[in-house]
Image (tube, rainbow, N blue to C red):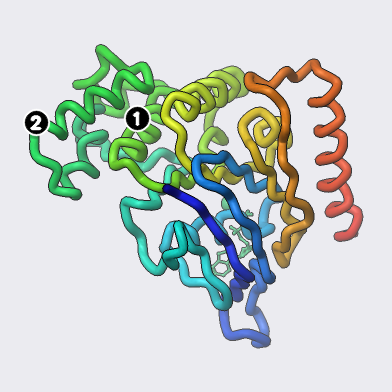
Amino acid sequence: MGQVAVSAVSKIYGEPGAIGSVVALDNVSFEIPDNRFCAILGHSGCGKTTLLNIAAGFEQATKGVVTVDGTPIREPGWQHTMIFQDYALFPWMSVAQNIAFGLEMKNIPRPEREQVTRHHIELVGLQGFEHKLPHHLSGGMRQRVAIARALAVCPRVLLMDEPFAALDAQNRSLMQDELVCIWQREPKTVLLVTHSIDEAIKLADYIVVMTRRPGRVKSFIEVDLPRPRDEDSAAYAKLKRRLRMSIHDEISDDQ
Ligand SMILES: Nc1ncnc2c1ncn2[C@@H]1O[C@H](COP(=O)(O)OP(=O)(O)O)[C@@H](O)[C@H]1O
Ligand SMILES: [Mg+2]
């Protein structure tokens, strides 16, 4: 299970109406069915991280609510785990220890913990690196550890905030393909924030295009293209054009 509903979510930083207060999100609503992949696409500062933080329970909405399977998210929990841009691994723990960490927090008994950890190491292709520390790994490999750690606790929803932004173009493309493969093997509801149109088309079933501040839903697009997505296909180019126009409008509106 992992149906996500964002219902009339607004977020104001500071006292509403006061000088210096920021309306980060304004009446944002959309729904993502179980096990589907959603990309939240928008310019920097449009409230993407704010929305994800609310879905993770790190921040409270000023108005509205995010629910998973009908239950409002009020605080952080393993059911809705977040993967950060900088991976946020524990530097003193090995790959295996990092992945097992959440399982220990869940009080999973040791034999099961080891089995689940092994499974996820294989899932992200890190066999042979179990005992390495994060600083011995490349950026792409660290991101794999972060994905394995997040998936190991079996969350209902996986939240990813520009997870590949720190990677170079080649590794980013590789990790996008990897993420799709992992997700296809073990489907999960995913909300992924990005400002890249190509990343959104490559990964997502649904794309939520956000307006500039205050963040509102500009369009909600279902991506009905077979995977792996063919960047050279006419359908891909058509969707890309549509998204580019939608995003471009935002720049024009702002000027
Ligand atoms: N803790 C905060 N206090 C005040 N303003 C904030 C805070 N966090 C974010 N903002 C503001 O809210 C807006 C949306 O930010 P953010 O969600 O980080 O956007 P994005 O992730 O799309 O770049 C920005 O104008 C940002 O400056
Ligand atoms: Mg952000």
Q: Amino acid at mark 1?
A: Val
Q: Nearer the viewer, residue 209 or 254?
A: 209
> Where does the image place residue 119, in percent across and percent down from the top left?
27, 23
Question: Quick check: 243 left or right of 190?
Answer: right
Name the residue: 44% across, 67% down: 72
Query: Based on the displayed image, in which of its 4 quarters is residue 233 positioned?
Result: top right
- Asked if residue 22 lies left or right of residue 74, the reply is right
Compared with residue 45, is residue 41 higher up or lower down, i.e. above or below? above
Q: Along the line of sight, which residue is nearer the eye, 141 or 103?
A: 103
Tell me the number on the disc at residue 145.
1
Query: Against 45, is 81 above or below?
Result: above
Instruction: Identify which residue is drawn at 78% across, 52% down.
Output: 219
Callout 2 crowding tier (Cα within 10 Å): few <14, some 14–19, many ≥20 = few
Rounded to the nearest angstrom, the CA distance separating label 1 from label 2 is 20 Å
Q: Secondary structure at mark 1?
A: helix
- Residue that numbered label 2 is attached to: 111
Q: Quadrant of residue 20?
A: bottom right
Please rate how many residues cluster around mark 1, counting C-alpha atoms within 10 Å: few if below 14, some from 14 to 19, many from 20: many
SS at mark 2 in the image = helix
Confirm or reject: label 2 Cβ below 8 Å from ligand 2.
Answer: no
* Residue type at numbered disc 2: Pro
Seen in the picture, residue 189 relative to 56 is either above or below; the reply is above
Say whether disc 1 or disc 2 marks the residue closer to the N-terminus: 2
Q: Where is residue 136 drawn, in percent x and y? A: 30, 21
Quick one: 254 or 59, which is closer to the camera? 59
